[in-house]
Amino acid sequence: MNGRFTPFLTQMLGLAFLFQGASVLMAQVGPTATPLRSYDKGFREPVRLATDAAGRLYVADPRLGLITIRDESGHLLGVRRGFDRPLGLAVDASGRIFVCEAGKGRVAIFTPDWVPAGALGQGDGEFQMPNHIQITPDGLVYVVDSAANLVKVYGPDNQVVRQFGGSGRLNGQLNFPTGLAVTSVGEIFVSDQGNERIQVFDATGAFLRKFGGTLGMLGNNTTFGRVQGLLADGQGRIYLADAFRGVVKVVNATGAVLGTIGAFGSDPGQLKGPSSLALDRNNRLFVATPGNTRVEIFGLDAYTDPHILSANLTVDPYDLRRGHELRRGHEPEPAGPGSATLVPERKQGHHGQPEDALQHRKSLLVSVLIKIPGVDPSSIQESSITANGIQPAHVPGAFIGDFDGDGNFEFRAWFDKHRLVATMPDGEAFLVLSGRLTDGRAFESIADIRVIPTQGSVQ
């Protein structure tokens, strides 16, 4: 009797597995991605990203040696400087911040208030090139050491628990790995960039499978290019930042492509050399695109999008000398350190001030033209404006007009040069301007500034 029913049972089991597989396939669909906007100010080479439980976004810029931090609405919270080629970033459940410093070969640890709190392993020299980092809910810290061709895993005591990889092309070996993603089921996906493939390991570091890889005599990969960054979402989908093709590929756990986000280019929503990915609590995907010097933002599936308005700024002058005012050809030179410049009283200007005195005062100020797309400049609240926390200086004259001759009105504000320079480091720096409209909406933007030391110059 058992023999008689075996084919039937086998057929039913086959159907059961078929329906189970179909349900899995139905669940594994690519996300719907909506281009939102980009952050294109405040860095020169945005390479690595991280988000925390509060929705803050951290961006590492190895060219400037700094990390910028924004809240979930896009407001710049701060800039942390002095890092030696910062790359990978991660924030653990307690709010501690981990920074991969390639220049020192270490992963430095900071408290939520940025107080130094040690480092992984021995500190300096622990890694040859710490490039990417992820912290799992159980507190394990995974670090991709690209130059050593290793993935190192650290425990709560900041010491190595295990490592896996090693140089080569065989299964389980790596050739300049650049990113990793640990899924909720404990599988570890590693972008094996030099071998143009993705390798998957179990929680112990044992090789499970791979996908991608070079094809044909020319070694062309028809699916993936040079994957720089990886990300796993809550549905088990894996996002691959394909730096070669300028897209983000979304795949399932076996490498089947579920969708593509973005396209190669420089227009809004397009990518050049995408290198890192991060998701926030609003289900927005952040993509670092150093080729476009910006971070692109996409809303995935059902998302929320808290954000402030972005303004366009024109700053004059761009170069500021520390301790001195920049002089233009007609401006008077001071007699010496600490001396006052005497300005003859000539033509009367606004409010009865001598015209020469007014012009000289303006030479000690920085002019900022503010444009907010789709917003009447008369709705900008002058009293709400600050630049690097400094309020505008009162200067007689029009605050709204077509000052740049482009046929559109803009709002102009003036700021004291000395006070602004005091808020900036020497060299490349940023002016962060924020304010509000009469309807209560906030706006913000960042402009480039160069600060020249009192002695010497900045190249």
Image (tube, rainbow, N blue to C red):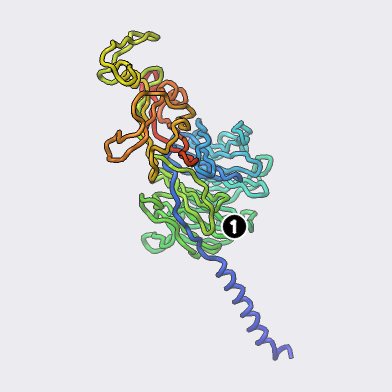
Q: Nearer the viewer, residue 406 or 79?
A: 406
Say left or right for 261 vs 116: left
Say left or right for 61 vs 208: left
The percent coordinates of residue 94 (x first, y second) are 66, 41
* Residue carrying label 1: 234
- The answer to whether 185 is drawn above or below residue 159 in the figure is below
The percent coordinates of residue 7 (x first, y second) are 65, 87
Q: Quadrant of the C terminus?
A: top left
Q: Amino acid at mark 1?
A: Gly
Q: Is residue 298 visible?
A: yes
Say left or right for 182 vs 391: right
Q: Quadrant of the N terminus?
A: bottom right
Q: Is residue 130 visible?
A: no
The percent coordinates of residue 353 (x first, y second) are 33, 16
Residue at image coords 30%, 13%: 333
Residue at image coords 39%, 56%: 263
Q: Nearer the viewer, residue 310 or 8?
A: 310
Say left or right for 108 vs 175: right
